[in-house]
Image (cartoon, helix red, strand yellow):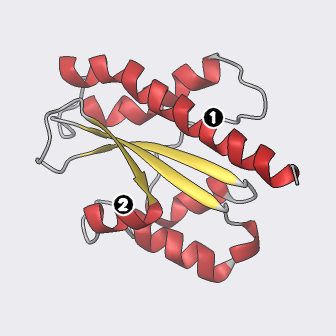
Amino acid sequence: MCDDAVGLRISERIESMNLPDVDCAQEAVGGLDILPAIHGYRFAVIVDAIQTMQYEPGTVMLYSESDFDDVIAGSSCHDVNLPTAMKIGRQMDPEIMPEEVRFVAIEVADIRTMSETMTPPVEEAVESGANAVLHLIEQFRKKGNSDRNP
């Protein structure tokens, strides 16, 4: 659905880089269906479209779980919104949930039109979104390495 593809496109871009110790999956799921995709990982980055109407389309935002909860609480077209799904996952299977989940959200303009192309501002944000993901991967690597060094 037009701009809703931005997360998939960013994931494909990261996957094409063949980064060591980085798995990518393009999932068109939300709510509780996201849990199996992140189970068993120490860190996870979820990239998706967001429509807050507070920012210009193409704006790339980084959120932690706690920030993201406040941003989208109660607003999901999926069965359960993402913050609720994360809380349920942490209650049901805390030992297989990631230690940390970060979100890269791209403000979108059109998520209703059937189209194989995105609007120009969102298309232009793919590179910035991919750079945001790479930044988070680097932060996770530093955390992982610092945990191993006394």
Residue found at x 62% / y 17%: 16
Q: Can residue 33 be seen in this view?
A: yes
Residue 76 makes an appearance in the image: no
> Mark 1 sits on what residue?
138
Q: Relative to residue 66, is residue 106 depicted above or below?
A: above
The reply to whether callout 2 and callout 1 are in contact (CB within 8 Å) is no
**Residue at x 36% of width, y 60% of height:** 68
Q: Mark 2 points at which residue?
A: 68
Please give the name of the residue rendered at 24% of the width and 65% of the height, measured from the top-left corner.
Answer: 75
Q: Is residue 81 above or below residue 93?
A: above
The kind of residue on which mark 1 rests is Glu
Which of pointers 2 and 1 lies earlier in the amino acid sequence?
Answer: 2
Horizontal relation, residue 40 to residue 69: left or right? right
For the image shown, how many numbered marks are present on the structure? 2
Which label lies toward us, 2 or 1? 1
The residue shown at (22%, 39%) is 111
Left or right for 104, reference 124: right
In this view, the residue farthest toward the front is 150
The picture places residue 87, in percent across and down from the top left corner, at 51, 76
Indicate the position of residue 134 as horizontal and vertical percent values. 55, 29
Please, what is the three-letter code of the amino acid marked with disc 2?
Phe
Query: Closest to the observer: 18 or 9?
Result: 18
Element on which disc 1 rests = helix
Left or right placement of residue 12 versus residue 21 in this view: left
Image x and y of residue 70, in percent: 29, 68
Instruction: Place residue 150 in its image quadrant.
Output: bottom right
Q: Where is residue 28 in the image (x, y as percent from the top left)?
A: 46, 44
Q: Real-space Cα distance between discs 2 and 1?
A: 21 Å
